[in-house]
Each structure stands twice: as C-alpha cells, then as structure tokens.
Image (cartoon, rainbow, N blue to C red):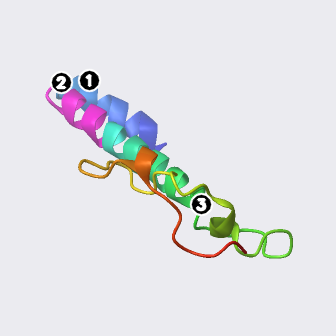
Amino acid sequence: MMFRTAVEHAKKHPGLIPQFFFICLGMGGASLYLIRLARGPHVTWNKTSNPEPWNKLDPTYQYKFVAITTDYKNLKKDGPEF
C-alpha cells in the first residue's frame, strides 16, 4: 500500500525519484552497519557457550572500522592469557 503510493507520487513528480533513492540507500547502509555491530567480537549472544568472546581474539585484531594511525600487525598482547 505504502509502496504503491510512493510510486504514484514518483510518477506525478519525477523530482522525488532521487530522494526516494537516497533515502533507501541511507536506510540500507544503516541496516548493514547495525548488522555489522551486532556481529562484532565484543557482543555476546550466547552466554553459556562463550561468555567472554573478546578474550579469544588475536592481539592484532583490528577493533575499529577504520584505523588511520594504528598498525595492528606490530602490536603485542600485554594482558594475561585466560
């Protein structure tokens, strides 16, 4: 119903087509980013099998989405092994 109304408005006013495109692009990007965050190494969905998944990560694991100044290949683990 709502999609049909949007298509009818786009037929009457062609200037709305880029707006619909960029709104859908933004919603899709936000959804993909939320999925990426939910699957991160610091999120625990099953606490019985692996209550602390961040302890099993390699010290060279890149936590940030973009790391400009940090070279993760040369990092050494400072903490104890659990």
Disc on res. 11 = 1
Against 63, residue 49 (above or below) is below
Contact, mark 3 vs mark 1 (Cβ under 8 Å): no
Q: Which residue is mark 2?
A: 14
- Viewer-proximal residue among 25 and 54: 54
Secondary structure found at label 2: loop
Determine the image quadrant of residue 47.
bottom right
Q: Residue placed farthest to the left in the image?
A: 15
Counting residues from the start of the chain, the first of labels 2 and 3 encountered is 2
Magenta-colored stretch includes residue 20: yes
Residue 15 spot, x, y in % from top left:
13, 28
Q: Within 10 Å of the Cα at label 1, are there few (<14), some (14-19), or many (20+) other Cα atoms?
A: few
Contact, mark 1 vs mark 2 (Cβ under 8 Å): yes
Magenta-colored stretch includes residue 65: no
Against 21, residue 73 (above or below) is below
Residue 21 spot, x, y in % from top left:
29, 32
Residue 79 spot, x, y in % from top left:
56, 74
Q: Residue placed farthest to the right in the image?
A: 49
